[in-house]
């Protein structure tokens, strides 16, 4: 229990961003609620995503992530996958529009206009920060760590917006293309995890300090690879199920629309309207 109540870090940039965004979201949601548009269920998802993200940085995870590689892997999954996924599922955009007017209307569609580029950008961010030179540098430099976490959140938001959408925004890519982008992202994460799990050499030498009293750096590195490999699967599987269900729903709606059009459209008689002279 002492681990849960010790080593909490005061990451002021993370706390300041959380307070501003969470308070703004609740204020905007309250204005929508006043107009009889209940959205508190979605608001709870968004607030949960914000809370998960900030807790991954200021809780003991923030401290132990500089000691154990596998703890840092858990932190990265929460910041890049789980937190942004919950925020996007919460659809906070209408709430923010109540506070900012229509200034954000042009930004969101622009972010959704290039789905493949957005997914590639996320994977570049995800893999780029795993490179030893950046991975070790972010551990030693708190300013660089802030940049790392900010790019994780931004990339995660772009990824989930392209895969599942977020009311009132809809993904630009059709369901099959979104499924392909999801599979590609899982493939990148799988390769990254396999490199760490089956690697025989230490990739992150900066973690080879005296803090490793329970396991070796290589064992820690291999466990981190397993965390990254397996940890990303549950949210991606949920996204795949969501894409499949929406695809089937769209297909059923299209078939129903075609059937109704056939029923309502006037049928042409096979007999001529006027008898002709033979």
Image (cartoon, rainbow, N blue to C red):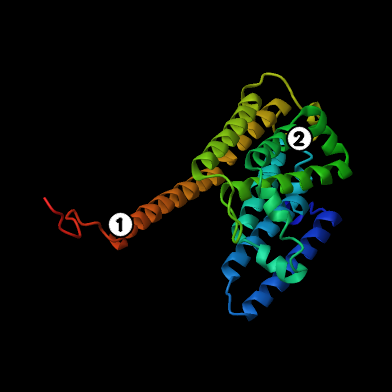
Question: What x and y, as percent, mark residue 189?
Answer: 62, 33
Location of mark 2 (residue): 129
Q: Quadrant of residue 114?
A: top right
Location of mark 1 (residue): 262
At x 67% / y 53%, what residue is drawn?
Answer: 109
Q: Nearer the viewer, residue 44 or 228?
A: 44
At x 72% / y 40%, what residue is drawn?
Answer: 72
Looking at the image, the residue that sits furthest to the left is 278
Helix, strand or loop status at disc 1:
helix
Against 265, residue 147 (above or below) is above
Disc assigned to residue 112:
none
Crowding near pointer 2: few (<14 within 10 Å), some, many (20+)? many
| Side of 267 relative to 51 (left or right) | left
At x 63% / y 66%, what residue is drawn?
Answer: 43
Question: What x and y, as percent, mark residue 211?
Answer: 79, 35
Asked if one can make out residue 157 in the rendered structure from this viewpoint, the answer is no
Crowding near pointer 1: few (<14 within 10 Å), some, many (20+)? few
Of callouts 1 and 2, the N-terminal one: 2
Q: Nearer the viewer, residue 205 or 155?
A: 155
Looking at the image, the residue that sits furthest to the front is 277
Helix, strand or loop status at disc 2:
loop
Question: What x and y, as percent, mark residue 232?
Answer: 59, 41
Numbered disc in front, either 1 or 2: 1
Q: Nearer the viewer, residue 71 or 267?
A: 267
Against 93, residue 245 (above or below) is above
At x 79% / y 40%, what residue is drawn?
Answer: 66
Q: Nearer the viewer, residue 82 or 215?
A: 82
Question: What x and y, as percent, mark residue 228?
Answer: 63, 36
């Amino acid at each position: 229990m002492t681990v849960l109540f010790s080593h909490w870090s005061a990451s002021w940039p993370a706390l300041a961003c959380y307070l501003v965004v969470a308070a703004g979201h609740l204020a905007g949601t309250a204005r929508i609620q006043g107009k009889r548009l209940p959205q508190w269920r979605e608001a709870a998802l968004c607030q949960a995503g914000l809370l998960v993200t900030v807790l991954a940085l200021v809780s003991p995870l923030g401290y132990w992530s500089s000691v154990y590689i596998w703890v840092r892997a858990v932190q990265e999954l929460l910041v890049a996958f789980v937190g942004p996924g919950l925020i996007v599922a919460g659809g906070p955009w209408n709430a923010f529009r109540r506070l900012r007017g229509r200034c954000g209307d042009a930004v969101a569609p622009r972010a959704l206009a290039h789905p493949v580029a957005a997914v590639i950008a996320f994977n570049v961010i995800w893999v780029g920060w795993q490179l030893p030179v950046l991975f070790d540098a972010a551990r030693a430099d708190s300013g660089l760590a802030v940049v790392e976490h900010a790019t994780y959140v931004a990339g995660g938001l772009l990824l989930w917006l392209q895969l599942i959408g977020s009311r009132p925004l809809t993904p630009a890519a059709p369901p099959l293309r979104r499924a392909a982008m999801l599979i590609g992202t899982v493939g990148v994460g799988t390769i990254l995890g396999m490199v760490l799990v089956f690697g025989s050499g230490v990739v992150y030498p900066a973690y080879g300090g005296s803090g490793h009293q329970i396991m070796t750096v290589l064992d820690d590195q291999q466990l981190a690879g397993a965390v990254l490999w397996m940890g990303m699967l549950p949210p991606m599987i949920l996204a795949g199920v969501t894409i499949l269900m929406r695809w089937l729903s769209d297909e059923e709606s299209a078939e129903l629309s075609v059937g109704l059009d056939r029923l309502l459209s006037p049928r042409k008689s096979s007999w001529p309207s006027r008898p002709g002279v033979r």
